[in-house]
Image (tube, rainbow, N blue to C red):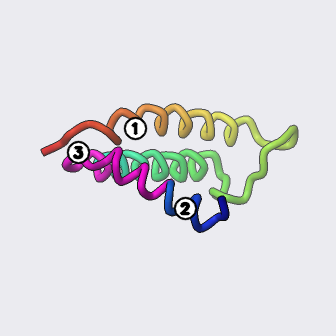
Amino acid sequence: MNSKQQIFFAFLVLLCVIHGTYAGPVAYAVCQTACNLGWVSCYASAGLVAGTVTGGLGAPLAAIACNVAQGVCMAACVGLLTAPTP
């Protein structure tokens, strides 16, 4: 399959998955946005600028803690994607 076919197939699968929900994807997007806002705030409180710290051995511990917290937050949002929210 070429890339256009793969994108079209992924779109069809996504369409089939969200067909039975009302506002689950919207709630998921709002949750993801809240996680990202928390991540930026966490970086700012540590005196860092979001998006400028690369991972690795030289990364500040505060940045790693913020990244872990963001990952946990985003994982908690997954259930909202398929939850019907009238």
Q: Distance between the residues labelled 2 and 1?
A: 24 Å
* Disc 3 crowd, CA 10 A, few/some/many (<14, 14-19, 20+): some
* Magenta-drawn segment: 10-26
The residue nearer to you, when weighing 18 against 78, is 18
Q: How far apart are marks 3 and 2 (CA)?
A: 22 Å
The secondary element bearing badge 3 is classed as loop
The secondary element bearing badge 1 is classed as helix
Type of amino acid under label 2: Ile
- Disc with the residue nearer the chain's start (3 vs 2): 2
Type of amino acid under label 1: Cys
Where is residue 78? Give x, y as percent: 41, 36
Q: Of circles 1 and 3, which is in front?
A: 3
Where is residue 32? Give x, y as percent: 43, 48
Q: Residue at x 45, y 45 (%)?
A: 35
Q: Are marks 1 and 3 in contact (CB under 8 Å)?
A: no
Q: Which residue lies furthest to the front in this view?
A: 1
Q: Residue at x 46, y 52 (%)?
A: 37
Instruction: Decide whether the magenta segment is chiefly helix, strand or loop.
Output: helix
13 over 3 or under it: above or below: above
- Name the residue tied to disc 3: 21
- Marking on residue 7: 2
61 over 12 or under it: above or below: above
* Disc 1 crowd, CA 10 A, few/some/many (<14, 14-19, 20+): some
Q: Of circles 3 and 2, which is in front?
A: 2
- Name the residue tied to disc 1: 77
Type of amino acid under label 3: Thr
The secondary element bearing badge 2 is classed as helix
Left or right of 11 in this view: 25: left
Where is residue 73? Give x, y as percent: 47, 36
- Disc with the residue nearer the chain's start (2 vs 1): 2
- Disc with the residue nearer the chain's start (1 vs 3): 3
Q: Which residue is drawn at 54% across and 40% down?
A: 70
